[in-house]
Amino acid sequence: MVIWRAPRSPQIKLNTDGSFDRDTLIAGRGGLIRDHSGRLMLAFHYFFQAVSSFHAELLALEMGLRHARKFSLQIWIELDAAAVVTTITSGGLGSWQVQHTLIRIRSMLRGLQYSISHIHREGNRPADHLAELGATALGSHIVNEGTTSHHPLALIRMDQLGYPSFRFS
């Protein structure tokens, strides 16, 4: 059982995800920012190109941080990319292809009170859905509760209510 947890006030929570197609190099980044009650503050999805799934995950995190910093300096970051969490927390450099992105992320994290953690994909369903939308919808889209489609809102509401997702091996 995987359950999404809301942050404690005044902290906000940023969930991000990257989607990547190795054959076309087409990627999508998606994410959402929620408050202590699980209410959606902002969601986004973007179409772009990346060099790897790791790169797509990093670019999704970078975009999420750009948006989240506008709401609060106390942020709980949660991703389903364990390698990204490990790289950020260990101070790793990553490959030459992603080093500039890591430098930008670390620069944005300075001055923030943040924590970063891993959640299985099943607990990150709204961000996963938004990343997939980003990979198929040209351009960039920033939405809030009043302007997003019903599917992401349903996933967000299920998280708010504490509905579990299930991970099968």
Image (cartoon, rainbow, N blue to C red):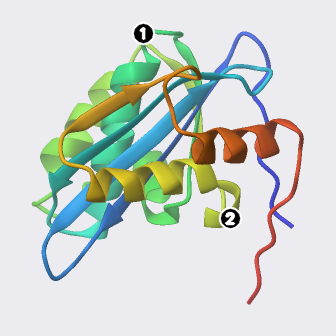
Question: In the depicted view, which residue is nearer to us: 154 or 125?
Answer: 154
Q: Which residue is drawn at 76% across and 20% down?
A: 36
- SS of the residue at dot 1? loop
In the rendered image, which quarter is residue 118 located in?
A: bottom right
In the displayed structure, 147 sits above or below 63; it is: above
Q: Which residue is drawn at 59% across and 44% down?
A: 152
Q: Mark 2 or mark 1: which comes first in sequence?
A: 1
Q: Position of residue 24 (x, y in %)?
A: 13, 75
Q: Where is residue 130 in the image (x, y as percent from the top left)?
A: 45, 48
Indicate which disc residue 61 carries: none
**Quarter holding the N terminus?**
bottom right
User: Which residue matches tag 2?
Assistant: 122
Q: Describe residue 147's horizontal placement relative to residue 98 as left or right.
A: right
Q: Which amino acid does label 1 sit on?
A: Lys
- SS of the residue at dot 2? helix
Q: Residue at x 65, y 38 (%)?
A: 153
Q: Describe residue 161's horizontal placement relative to residue 96 as left or right.
A: right
Question: In the depicted view, which residue is nearer to us: 73 or 18?
Answer: 18
User: Which residue matches tag 1?
Assistant: 70
Q: What residue type is labelled 2?
A: Glu
Q: Describe residue 98's horizontal placement relative to residue 130 as left or right.
A: left
Rounded to the nearest angstrom, the CA distance separating label 2 from label 1 is 28 Å
Sort mark 2 into few (<14), some (14-19) or many (20+) by Cα contacts within 10 Å.
Answer: some
Q: Which residue lies furthest to the bottom in this view?
A: 169
